[in-house]
Each structure stands twice: as C-alpha cells, then as structure tokens.
Image: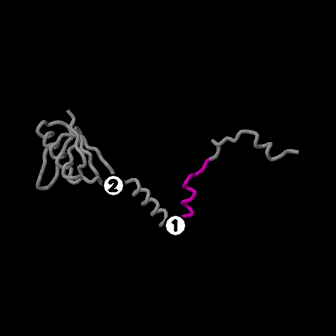
Amino acid sequence: MTYLNDHFDEKLDLSKIRDRGSKKWVAMMLPEHVRLIREYNDASKKEPRPQLDEWDLEEIQQLIEIAMKRNVEVEMKIWKNGEFIYQVGRITWVDLNKRVIEMEDIFQSFTLTFGEIVNVTIFE
C-alpha cells in the first residue's frame, strides 16, 4: 500500500510552476478598477515637489551667475511631473522677463523655466 506522503519524499521542483502573477486577477476586474489601480501606482511613484525657501533660491541664483561668468558646465536638478530630471550643460542665456534659462550640451540646446529648477551643481 502506498501512501500519499510517499510521493512527497521527492523534492518539489518549483521551476516548473509558471504563475502569471497579477495578470490572472486583471481578467476578473472591471476596466474602471484596472484604470484606478494603474493611476494609483503611477501617483505613488511620484515624488512631491520640494519646497524651496528664499535661501535656497538665493543659492541657486548665485550658482547660475557663477556658472555663466566662468562658462563652466552645470548640472540642473529639475522637478517635472512628480519626478526629478538631471540636465547637464552650459548656460548660454538667462531671460529674466520670460523666467527661462537656455542651456546646451554636446547634442542639443534646451530651455528650462525658473520654477522647475530645484538644485544647481557646478562642474569645475
């Protein structure tokens, strides 16, 4: 007589199990639920906009002025749509009326607004 436990003496090979993960639950959800879950996941990945005080803004302004005078590369830390983006290049123009900074790297030129800038680092 063989018992059920006799078959479990062999090692269980977990590599043969092919679980579909969360895909198997999507078929049982309404499209509205799926959309809300995706929106929630996207929102949870976003980082809040850092609050800069007047000292931080003054430091950013001074670093931009120094970088323009010395014509050196800078790294701009920018906050856009809940994520931080780093732009590296040389500052070519600052337009105080439009509140924009024009920069260029070896591939392209681009424009940043003052409100996007969170931090500036000078490379020397």
Q: In front here: 51 or 27?
A: 51
Q: Which residue lies furthest to the top in this view?
A: 124
- Report how many numbered discs are placed on residues in the image: 2
Q: In front here: 85 or 108?
A: 85
Q: Residue furthest right?
A: 1
Which quadrant holds the N terminus? top right
Magenta span: helix, strand or loop, mainly?
loop
Q: In front here: 50 or 87?
A: 50
Identity of the residue drawn at 22% across and 38% down: 106
Circles 2 and 1 in contact, beta carbons < 8 Å: no
Distance (Cα) linking label 2 and label 1: 30 Å
Of callouts 2 and 1, which one flags the residue occurring earlier in the amino acid sequence? 1
Instruction: For label 1, count other residues whose C-alpha is less than 10 Å away and answer few (under 14), some (14-19) or many (20+).
Output: few
Q: Would residue 6 be found to the left or right of residue 91 on screen?
A: right
Identity of the residue drawn at 67% across and 41% down: 13
Q: Would residue 53 be found to the left or right of residue 35 on screen?
A: left
Which quadrant holds the C terminus? top left
Q: As displayed, is residue 41 above or below residue 3? A: below
Q: Would residue 34 be found to the left or right of residue 116 on screen?
A: right
| Amino acid at circle 2 | Pro
Identity of the residue drawn at 64% across and 46% down: 17
Query: x, y (%) of residue 74?
Result: 21, 39
| Amino acid at circle 1 | Leu
Q: Give SS at disc 2.
A: loop
- State the residue position of label 1: 30
- Residue 43 quadrant: bottom left
- State the residue position of label 2: 48
Instruction: For label 2, count other residues whose C-alpha is less than 10 Å away and answer few (under 14), some (14-19) or many (20+).
Output: few
Q: Residue 92 carries which label?
A: none
Q: Give the range drawn in magenta.
A: 18-31
